[in-house]
Amino acid sequence: MKKTKLLSLLLSVIFVVSLLAGCGGGGTAETTAPETTAPETTAPETTAPSDGAYEITLNIASEPQSIDPALNSAVDGAIMLGHMFEGLMKWEDSGVEANGSDGTANNAALTYGQAASYEKAENADGTVTYTFTLRDDAMWSDGQPVTAQDFVYSWQRLVTPETAADYNYMIDCVVNANEIMAGEKEPSELGVSAPDEHTFVVTLVNDLPYFTEICAFPATFPVRQDMIEAAGDQWTFDTATYLSNGPYTMTAWNHNSEIIMEPNQYYYDVANLGPDKITFKLMDDQNAMLSGFNSGELDFIEDVPQAEIAGLIASGDLKIVDYIGTYYVCYQTQKAPFDNPKVRQAFTLAVDRTYIVNQVTQSGQVEAGGFVPAGVYDAEGASGADFRTNGGDYYAPTDADYEANCELARQLLAEAGYPNGEGFPVVEYLYNTSDAHKAVAEALQYMWETELGVTVTLNNQEWAVFLQTRKDGDYSIARNGWIADYNDPMSFLDMWLTGGGNNDAQYVNPEYDALIQAAKSTTDPAERMQAMHDAEDIIIGQDWALNPLYFYTQKYMISDRINGMYYTPLGYFFFTYAQPNA
């Protein structure tokens, strides 16, 4: 991997600053209650905002698959949830400008959210107990207090098998979580408790260096038990039952059109919030996005037509910031022909990654030589070489050795029984609707057909449908991408455990599972990192279950109407305290 391309990424991801000792913000909660009538469930008329109102309109993605904190598994949904809910911890503006943002965004830093403080204690049996004290002024959007029991219910719900949460493993570090997910114990036996309304106690099997980041992750956000039990699976669709505890609350969800949020009048820092209304437009047409931004209808977009990228970067209108993630191809490892590791390796080696990043994506991405991306810490943390540098490349990712890669790929395909592609079935590459994903798909199709002599058809699906199709394993090859949930290799590796909710490859290898569990069972930094390196050696270097293409960068366009946005390279944008530019 080219160190010159990695330098800015490695420098900028040292963004996880020391945990602040006080609560975020400084405002006080409103002492008067808002109107008690139910919020509107349909969009307001598109009239101009009243004098003095500050309203912004954003586009992050199309219709989210879910806005249930436990069920969401996409970054776009997480961004929306981060405006409406708040965990024990949260992300705040660090005041340090994000690399590449040209002053339009600062980096985010971890701080206290619904918790005012916490204490950590090591127990005689090797477990570790975190005791969180909740804020006295933590409130739901209907004025009821947020209690420790809300967190107990929400964390138990996350690991309950009936919830079927893809991210249930996010808290598998909690005592009895794995046994509950396996159906061997009851959710009530999870290692969490609420001694009183303001004290939430969590006992971990062993300590994790990133546990406080998990406490800021959407899957661990609190939800209201009474609303979910009353409305069931429909609780997120009605603003009367979709109660939130964060800075904003949803006032309308017009499906495939927009989600509208307004300030939660009971939020402890409501007096300091920025926009009076945030509208998330739900769109997947890049031409419409750019047109909307240019006309002033949209104040922020994350995607633009592929043909416009180079020009927009040159003009400075398109910002490119760091993003800890990997864009990759996912094989359905349980179905022929991709149940054969030699076939998977052949398809992986036949990809010219340099061409893809230089001629197709054109946004500063770096060719991937492994699955865990650059910028993820190894045993020495931010002070040492990162996990990717220490792990090295599993194949030559640049075009210097591309011909050698292709020669080996053809040999492997012949060994698998398909010399020169003869007899290889027609396979389909699945991707979600996007000009950018289509361009990558067409490049891959050409490379596989040219170098391997196989026929690959292309199929695109709307985002929510695509996610479900991939989750169900109803595909041969599919576009995929993963962004770090926290800065640790485990965020990229434990998703491939047998039966994991995000294991779209349907990958199964007991040796791999054992290494991941070993990494989760030790607190020795060198031991746990070595176990994860060994695990990546198996899934990529031996089984070739995934085909990493490149390490992400994040692009966006932002109106000069927005000042004060902040961002974490985990992929989350925050507009909570945005203000109009002077």
Image (cartoon, grey):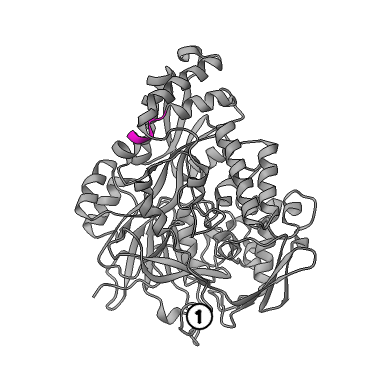
Q: Residue at x 52, y 80 (%)?
A: 22
Task: Characterize the magenta stretch by its predominant secondary structure.
Answer: helix
Q: Quadrant of residue 133?
A: bottom right
Image height of 226 relative to 330, above or below: below
Q: Which residue is mark 1?
A: 268
Q: Where residue 57 appears, x then y in whole percent?
A: 33, 62
Say whether residue 293 is left or right of residue 576: left
Q: Is residue 107 visible?
A: yes
Q: Where residue 488 appears, x then y in whole percent?
A: 55, 54
- Span highlighted in magenta in the image: 351-355
Front residue of 546/164: it is 546
Q: Residue at x 58, y 80 (%)?
A: 135
Say whether residue 188 is left or right of residue 105: right
Front residue of 579/440: it is 440
Q: Where residue 167 appears, x then y in whole percent?
A: 60, 52
Which quadrant is home to the N terminus? top left
Q: Quadrant of residue 99?
A: bottom left
Q: Quadrant of residue 352?
A: top left
Disc 1 packing (10 Å; few <14; some 14–19; many ≥20) = many
Query: Is 220 colored magenta in this rendering?
Result: no
At mark 1, the secondary structure is loop
